[in-house]
Image: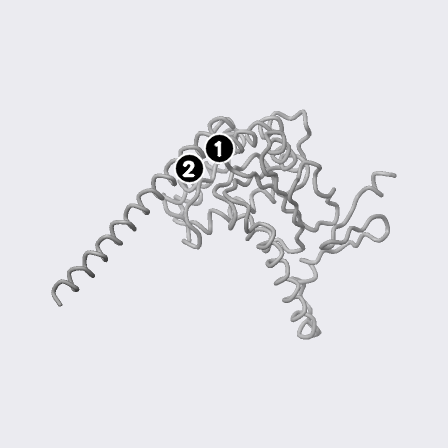
């Protein structure tokens, strides 16, 4: 089989190769401008397909438990230091009691799934329909394929207790800023977002602190929505601290609920005594 023939296109549950592989994705067809008005007749059916993606995603992940998502470039090979570091990162995440979620592809995604699988943890891949995607990597134990990016990104946010972002390109940046925007606008609760590789991310941070912050486009606390570290060991420490804080918060919430219950019981007894 030639390299061209090995390329495949996933269309929901269907895999297409060779001359059957289309040159356009479902997202393109959804978002294209159609001046003919024919979209009135076709988009209602797309809504049902979109709904089915959410139903399938929610159904597959509902019992997953706490998880951390790892993002990064699909283009890094197994000899790259970030690939090897991601394998160890995922193993550490499993030791903290989390499942590992990635985009299910090659590169950093494969490394994350590989580390989770080798550590005996739950390895999840959320794939996406792309014209030249290589398919779900071999280390995914629970895989869900999506046609639409927005449905897929909803699953990352809904089922993750934190994001770890390795060096990557536009897709990685898309997933990073999706989380930052949702936290900034209070659409989701705060969770740790850790960028690994200070040298790689420093230019982005400098731009945010100068052009964006000094230009009044964001507020100072917005820059602190993410943590930047040099090593995967530091990233694990950030996740460990966040887990401990969450546990302490949950314990305090249980104590507060118990106090409220006791107060209600006392009030009921007092009313009964007065009668």
State the residue in front, 236 or 124.
Answer: 124
Q: Quadrant of residue 42?
A: bottom right
| Residue 80: % across, % down | 64, 26
What is the number of the mark on residue 60? Answer: none
In the displayed structure, does residue 212 sit left or right of residue 119? left
Element carrying mark 2 = helix
- The image shows residue 80, relative to residue 252, as above or below, that is above
Sort mark 2 into few (<14), some (14-19) or many (20+) by Cα contacts within 10 Å.
some
Marks 1 and 2: CB-CB under 8 Å? yes
Q: Is residue 5 left or right of residue 25?
A: right
Image coordinates for residue 27, horizontal then vertical, percent: 67, 58
In the rendered view of the protein, which quadrant contains the C terminus?
bottom left
Coloration mode: one colour
User: In the drawing, what numbered circle is on residue 243?
Assistant: 2
Query: Quick one: label 1 or label 2, which is nearer the N terminus?
Result: 1
Tell me the residue at 73%/53% (across/down).
13
Q: Nearer the viewer, residue 46 or 229?
A: 46
Residue drawn at (67%, 40%) of the image: 105
The residue tagged 1 is 96
Which quadrant holds residue 50? bottom right
Q: Nearer the viewer, residue 1 or 51?
A: 51
Q: Quadrant of residue 123?
A: top right
């Amino acid at each position: 089989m030639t390299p061209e023939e090995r390329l495949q296109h996933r269309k929901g549950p269907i895999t297409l190769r060779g001359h059957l592989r289309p040159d356009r994705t479902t997202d393109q067809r959804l978002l294209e401008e159609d001046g003919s008005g024919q979209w009135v007749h076709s988009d209602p059916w797309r809504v049902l397909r979109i709904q089915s993606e959410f139903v399938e995603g929610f159904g597959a992940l509902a019992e997953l438990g706490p998880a951390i998502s790892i993002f990064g470039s699909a283009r890094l090979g197994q000899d790259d230091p970030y690939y090897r570091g991601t394998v160890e990162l995922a193993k550490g995440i499993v030791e903290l009691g989390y499942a590992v979620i990635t985009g299910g592809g090659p590169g950093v995604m494969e490394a994350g799934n590989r580390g989770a699988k080798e550590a005996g943890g739950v390895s999840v891949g959320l794939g996406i329909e792309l014209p030249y995607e290589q398919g779900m990597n071999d280390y995914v134990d629970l895989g869900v394929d999506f046609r639409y990016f927005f449905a897929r990104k909803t699953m990352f946010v809904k089922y993750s207790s934190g994001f770890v972002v390795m060096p990557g390109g536009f897709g990685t940046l898309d997933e990073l800023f999706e989380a930052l925007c949702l936290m900034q606008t209070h659409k989701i609760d705060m969770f740790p977002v850790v960028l690994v590789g200070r040298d790689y991310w420093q230019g982005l941070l400098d731009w945010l602190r100068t052009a964006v912050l000094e230009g009044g486009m964001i507020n100072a606390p917005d820059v602190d929505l993410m943590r930047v570290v040099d090593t995967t060991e530091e990233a694990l420490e950030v996740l460990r601290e966040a887990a401990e804080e969450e546990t302490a918060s949950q314990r305090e919430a249980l104590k507060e609920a118990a106090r409220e219950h006791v107060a209600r019981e006392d009030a009921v007894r007092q009313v009964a005594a007065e009668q």
